[in-house]
């Protein structure tokens, strides 16, 4: 997987090491395809916040954002965080609870991911998805497996 240079548009940061780490870590090309933006991060606290637009092409026939696209946005936030805080790892489990529909009136969604725990073989994350009005739209839990020998 090729590395992508993904940084906040305004160049701001809450930790100087994030940019160095992102330059050397694989970031999924779909992050760019989904027009993702890094909003905030705190590597000491193990958090990363990203924003994604709610595009018409992501809507289902009911004119709400398709659940799979919400899941992709969550994965595209937790995944880069996992690459920043741990050795190479892969998603083993992703559980999402949808709380409310995300409609076209919501121009963006914001995902905040948090590393909750780490063992020898696993990373455990939580995430929240909020609309641009701050309403909680979904929550997620993920378990990542740390690849052996990494």
Image (spheres, rainbow, N blue to C red):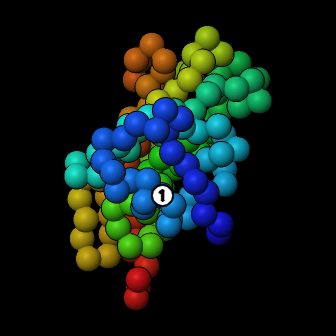
Position of 73 with respect to 78 (left or right) is right
Q: Residue at x 58, y 39 (%)?
A: 36
Q: Which of the pair 52/13 is nearer the observer?
A: 13
Give the residue pinned by disc 1: 22
Would residue 63 be found to the left or right of residue 96 on screen?
Answer: right
Above or below, 93 relative to 101:
below
Q: Residue at x 26, y 77 (%)?
A: 120
Q: Which element type, helix, strand or loop, lies under badge 1?
A: helix
Q: Position of residue 75 (x, y in %)?
A: 52, 50
Q: Position of residue 83 (x, y in %)?
A: 43, 63
Q: Position of residue 13 (x, y in %)?
A: 36, 41
Q: Determine the residue positioned at 33% across, 62% down.
A: 85
Considering every residue shown, the one lying at the far bottom of the view is 149
Q: Nearer the viewer, residue 12 or 96?
A: 12
Could you classify mark 1 by the number of other residues whose Cα lies within 10 Å: few (under 14), some (14-19), or many (20 or more)?
A: some
Q: Quadrant of the C terminus?
A: bottom left
């Amino acid at each position: 997987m090729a590395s992508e240079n993904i940084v906040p548009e305004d160049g701001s940061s809450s930790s100087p090491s994030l940019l160095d780490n992102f330059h050397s870590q694989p970031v999924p090309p779909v992050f760019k395809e989904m027009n993702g933006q890094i909003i905030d991060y705190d590597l000491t606290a193990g958090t990363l916040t990203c924003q994604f637009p709610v595009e018409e092409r992501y809507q289902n026939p009911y004119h709400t954002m398709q659940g799979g696209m919400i899941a992709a946005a969550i994965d595209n936030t937790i995944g880069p965080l996992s690459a920043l805080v741990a050795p190479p790892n892969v998603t083993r489990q992703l559980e999402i609870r949808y709380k409310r529909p995300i409609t076209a009136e919501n121009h963006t969604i914001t995902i905040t991911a948090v590393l909750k725990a780490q063992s020898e073989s696993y990373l455990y994350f939580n995430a929240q998805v909020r609309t641009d009005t701050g309403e909680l739209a979904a929550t997620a839990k993920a378990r990542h497996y740390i690849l052996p020998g990494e």
